[in-house]
Amino acid sequence: MSPRKPDAPLHVAFVCDEYPPALSGGIGPAVAALARGLAAAGHKVSVIGHYEKPSRDDDAGVTIYRLSYPRVPFAWLVVRKQLRAAIADLHRSQPIDIVEWPDYRGMYWSGLPGVTDVLKIHGTIMSHRVHAVGRNHGLRSRIIEILERRAMHAIPYWVGVSATFKEEWKTYLRAEPRVEEVVYNPVDTQMFRPDSRAREKLLLYCGGFRYRKGVLVLASALGLAHAALGDYRMLMMGFEADVSMDELRHAAGPAAARLEFRSFASQQEVAEQMRRAQLYVMPSYYESCGNTWLEAMASGTPVIGSTLSCGPEVITANETGLLANPNSAADVAAKLQQLLGDPQLAARLGKAARHRAEELFSVEVGVMRSLAFYRRVLEDAARGT
């Protein structure tokens, strides 16, 4: 076989069950942004996963193979073998160079000859238990943890969505990937961008209503700061996960009437609300990358993030945003008052955040870093070391 040309187009296949418009956390939008970027750069890109309805679709040059989820006993095993079979079928007709697997739920089963597997360190079910922020650690979760560990030990090529999270899992699992890299989840900086309109008196949170996202401490902080914040609205755009709207209203106390809830239908709608908001707030207990922090930064929207996990890596305190302690509603309340009470600070943070997003979090940067990683991996795999 002749050696691969260094700049030859690749066929990259992403395993993803959350490709938009499927309801998802951060993995779906991140995969979509990177996949579209790779396709625009001239590479062949496929997405394979399980969805409610089987189909084959095209999205900006990305081919999406939606498999039907099997409703059978031992479905956890069947779906993994079904994925492998679907990838094998695709590889026979359209040879695949790279398959990028999520660590979440441990979907990897076994490799295929001629295909190189890489693992994207997004975050796992196991992460919820380790960080003590999940609410369900039953038998199903324990089985998934075993599968996640298995995948993380089986695949020697890791790309983390933050250095913090990648290094944490290397230490926790005592793993030594052969080739590793950090590629932050890419943000479409044309979709998420500031505009010239005046900001509304709007505070914003986007995503699932999850305990680990700090939504309950955010609601409590609004209750503490309510009298000092003046006229404002708190828009919580997302869906009930392990925290309900009633729980959030209860935690907000006197600020409950200021909470507005809305399901989001598209990334375009999220981007529109980001441009309108005075600030974005998500004081998470842990994040692997914090997609919505990045989207807010790209929108020039001042951000209140978290002192924990990758918060300080993604957001430079007092330079591109503020960091709050999610274990302290009082600290979150103080940061809300600080940012809303100082328009000059908010403008400075928003401008610096946009610059950082363009420099580190754009799709173009994500594509460049991903391709460099893929080519290093392929060279290593070709050496058979």
Image (cartoon, rainbow, N blue to C red):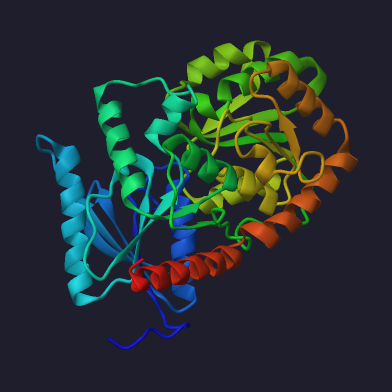
Q: Where does the image place residue 243, in percent across and percent down from the top left?
A: 46, 22
Q: Residue at x 23, y 50 (%)?
A: 109
Q: Which residue is situated farthest in the left direction here?
A: 73
Q: Where does the image place residue 113, in percent across and percent down from the top left?
A: 21, 67
Examine the rendering and report whether any part of residue 240 can be seen.
no
Q: Image check: 321 left or right of 189?
A: right
- The quarter of the displayed image where residue 157 is located: bottom left
Q: Residue at x 76, y 41 (%)?
A: 321
Q: How many marks?
A: 0
Examine the rendering and report whether any part of residue 206 can be seen.
yes
Q: Image check: 262 left or right of 138?
A: right
Q: Image check: 54 left or right of 135?
A: left
Q: Residue at x 69, y 39 (%)?
A: 312
Front-most of 168 and 8?
Answer: 168
Q: Which residue is situated farthest in the bottom direction here?
A: 2
- The quarter of the displayed image where residue 354 is located: bottom right
Give the vertical position of 51 relative to 329 (above or below): below
Front-most of 238 and 133?
Answer: 133
- The quarter of the displayed image where residue 25 is located: top left
Which quarter of the rendered picture does the N terminus lie within? Answer: bottom left
Which quarter of the rendered picture does the C terminus lie within? Answer: bottom left
Q: Image check: 294 left or right of 74?
A: right
Q: Where does the image place residue 51, in percent across and percent down from the top left?
A: 26, 48
Give the vertical position of 103 relative to 250 (above or below): below
Q: Where does the image place residue 104, in percent across and percent down from the top left?
A: 37, 42
